[in-house]
Amino acid sequence: MEAQKTARELFTEAVRAVLETWPVLQIAVDNGFGGVYGQQKADWMVDVVQQYFHDNANLQPDEVEDYIADLMNNEFDTVVEDGSLPQVAQKVSQIFTQCQQGKLAEVKDQIVKLNKKSAERAIVTPQPNAADDVESNGDETEFMECEAATSTNPPRSAAPKQTDQPQSQEENDGWTTVVRKK
């Protein structure tokens, strides 16, 4: 009985490690897709995923995938389309099978590897955020330049471009054509 309890606790720890290293969930949490309680929802997901395995016999990875997809949609308003969901479902299913087979040493090794990956992510995280800030400032500047180009180009380019039929059709459709300065 003690070994089974240890296997269940180990499985819960493994689910946590898998979900914490899943970029989709971390992006959802980091960007507030789950609201102010996003991290609590991510922690709750660990519990409900491990419970799902214990409540249902012979789960197939596609069933696990559907369950996690529903959780992500319902709790984080996120539809996972990057192809990572089947991998996460497969990994969790594989670890559950290993726990059931008593291969706890293998599961512990996987948890250690996943935790290292999670630690590396934590170290790297500040740099992309700083780069994103610089990038977004660049985007704002570029957007502002586009606005300036839009407001100055039409009077200057209106006469020569009148004969160009596709251009005038686009403008009539409500789209603004932004022309790069040369």
Image (cartoon, rainbow, N blue to C red):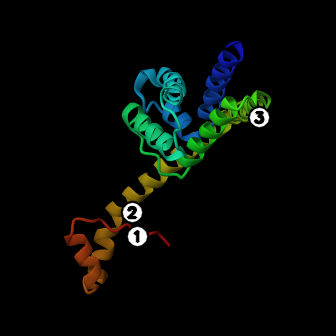
Q: Which amino acid does label 2 sit on?
A: Ala
Image spot of residue 175 (x, y percent): 27, 65
Q: Which amino acid does label 1 sit on?
A: Val
Q: Mark 1 points at which residue?
A: 179
Image spot of residue 123 (x, y percent): 72, 32
Q: In the current view of this chain or complex, which residue is farthest to the left? A: 172
Seen from the viewer's position, the closer of residues 69 and 61 is: 61
| Distance of label 1 from label 3 (alpha carbons) | 50 Å
Q: Residue at x 42, y 40 (%)?
A: 78
Image spot of residue 179 (x, y percent): 40, 70
Q: Is residue 36 found left or right of 60 in the rendered image?
A: left
Q: Do the residues labelled 1 and 3 touch (CB within 8 Å)?
A: no
Q: Earlier in the sequence, mark 2 or mark 3?
A: 3
| Distance of label 1 from label 2 (alpha carbons) | 7 Å
Kindly indicate the quadrant of the structure image that contains residue 50: top right
Image spot of residue 3 (x, y percent): 71, 17
Which element type, helix, strand or loop, lies under badge 1?
Answer: loop
Q: Which amino acid does label 3 sit on?
A: Lys
Q: Is residue 116 found left or right of 132 in the rendered image?
A: right
How many numbered circles are shown?
A: 3
Seen from the viewer's position, the closer of residues 140 and 22 is: 22
Q: Name the residue under label 2.
A: 149
| Distance of label 2 from label 3 (alpha carbons) | 52 Å
Seen from the viewer's position, the closer of residues 58 and 132 is: 58
Q: Do the residues labelled 1 and 2 touch (CB within 8 Å)?
A: yes
Q: Which of marks 1 and 3 is nearer the N terminus?
A: 3
Residue 61 can be seen in this image: yes
Compared with residue 156, is residue 37 higher up or lower down, i.e. above or below? above
Q: In the current view of this chain or complex, which residue is farthest to the top? A: 2
Count residues near mark 1 (Cα–Cα under 10 Å), then give few for <14, some for 14-19, many for 20+. few
Q: Mark 3 points at which residue?
A: 113
Q: Which residue is drawn at 49% across and 20% down?
A: 40
